[in-house]
Amino acid sequence: MSVGVFSAAFVLMIGMMLIGVPIAVSMAVIGIVGGIAAYGVPFMDSIAPVIWGVQNENLLTSIPLFVLLGELLLRSGIADRMYIALSAWLGRLPGGLLHTNIGSCALFAATSGSSVATAATIGTVALPSLQKRGYSMRASLGSLAAGGTLGILIPPSVNMIVYGSLTNNSIGKLFIAGIIPGLVLTGCFMLWIWVSSVASGTVKREDKVPLDQRLRTLQFLVPPLVVFGIVMGSLYFGIATTTESAALGVIAALLFVWQSGKLSWEVLRTCFISTARVSGMILLIIMAAFILNLTISLTGVADAMTKAVTSLGLSATTMILVLIVFYLILGMFMDVLSMQVATIPITYPIVTALGVDPIWFGIFIVLMCELGLITPPVGMNLFVVHGIRRDKGGIEDAIWGALPYVLIMIGFTLLLIAVPGLATWLPAKM
């Protein structure tokens, strides 16, 4: 299969996804048809071992565990109490509850591997209070949509697990690498809210909460912080593998749900069904991605494309800048997971051949996925937060509200290029 033929097949695959063909089906069809075209029907004999290997990969067991972890904390009411606690501490800042939106998303992201779940959970808790207090709907929706993207940057992150499985990189190092960028990006979002609030001349602040009441609310922050500490601490110090740390997190979450009085068979049943649906979809996509990867590797397309790009004499920085534009455009029309699994097998060999650190590139890919979540017309977080609002406003409020955060994230990506240590320093200390 020549590079030209593969490029046409890639475009066809993207087209199938855009017209609504399931992601896994699109990738599997292109992979199987391409393999048969190159090697004939005997190619099918190579697929079974690949599927068996993927479905028996111990690392991927962590995906349903992390999904279940987020579901347990969502159903237990912990997010509601967490929002109350953070509003008591952050509400006095210029911008008021908008800071609480970002802080709550960042903290919930530390226990949930999904951006959409983060935006939906915090949005459901926050929007009624924001509307009642007269906050700008545009600013409110924008902060919730952007804050939700932190769900896949601040570990644990399902998207990092997918990247690690596709590229054979350490999930633990990827998780640790996301901590500093996640915190810095959270700070950038909150700085923007502060500056824009002051500049607008209509500074929103919440009433000051007495110190003793604020101190009492700190108990509501204990569950997410303890779960995060258990998961990331066990990984950082080498006590547990990624799957084991996820299991420890689930056990801790179950204890907190039991303590809250919400542990029941109905809650568990809801969590298990939701986890099965999400995990089944993700694992099916990963399986299809490995089928496509098999075709790419056997036909030598990845090697040919890598040689073609490196022969152009592009520097690693120039290549990354090109990829920013590429992913920004692609993210406007594809959902995050399909964009990730469709492009990583192509871009990863190229950038690593140019000397880019694979862990750093994983954080870069996650940032590009974050951009895709808040760029129209297919920005999932935009639709999620818009769907939560109670009035009859249009989705343009969410789009315009998220625009400043798109620019901030592009600026932060450039900062990450200039200071790669933001992503590589902490994993090096493991």
Image (cartoon, rainbow, N blue to C red):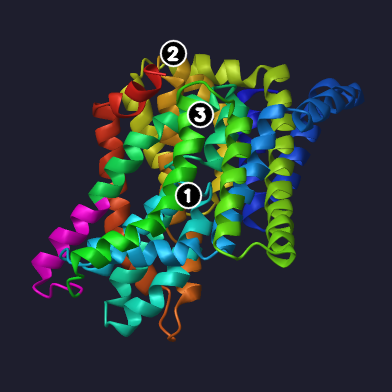
Q: Give the position of the C terminus as an image quadrant.
A: top left
**Dot 3 crowding, Cα within 10 Å, few <14, some 14–19, many 20+:** many
Percent coordinates x, y for residue 336 in the rendering:
53, 48
Q: Amino acid at mark 3?
A: Ser
x 23%, y 55%: residue:
190
| Comparing labels 1 and 2, the label whose residue is closer to the camera | 1
Q: Earlier in the sequence, mark 1 or mark 2?
A: 2
Q: CA distance from mark 2 to mark 3?
A: 43 Å
Q: Amino acid at mark 2?
A: Ser
Q: Secondary structure at mark 1?
A: helix
The reply to whether residue 121 is in sight is yes
Query: Mostly what secondary structure, the magenta segment?
Result: helix
Magenta stretch: includes residue 202: yes
| Comparing labels 2 and 3, the label whose residue is closer to the camera | 3
Q: Give the position of the N terminus as an image quadrant.
A: top right
Relative to 380, say whether 37 is above or below.
Answer: above
Q: Secondary structure at mark 2?
A: loop
> From which residue to which does the magenta span run?
189-206
Provide the residue designation for mark 1.
331
Front position in the image: 260 or 86:
260
Q: CA distance from mark 1 to mark 2?
A: 28 Å
x 71%, y 28%: residue:
58
Provide the residue designation for mark 2.
311
On the picture, is 165 further left or further right than 82?
Answer: right
Q: CA distance from mark 3 to mark 1?
A: 34 Å
Whether residues under marks 2 and 3 lie with C-beta atoms below 8 angstroms apart, the answer is no
The reply to whether residue 372 is in sight is no
Provide the residue designation for mark 3.
234
Q: Amino acid at mark 1?
A: Gly
On the picture, is 213 further left or further right than 287?
Answer: left
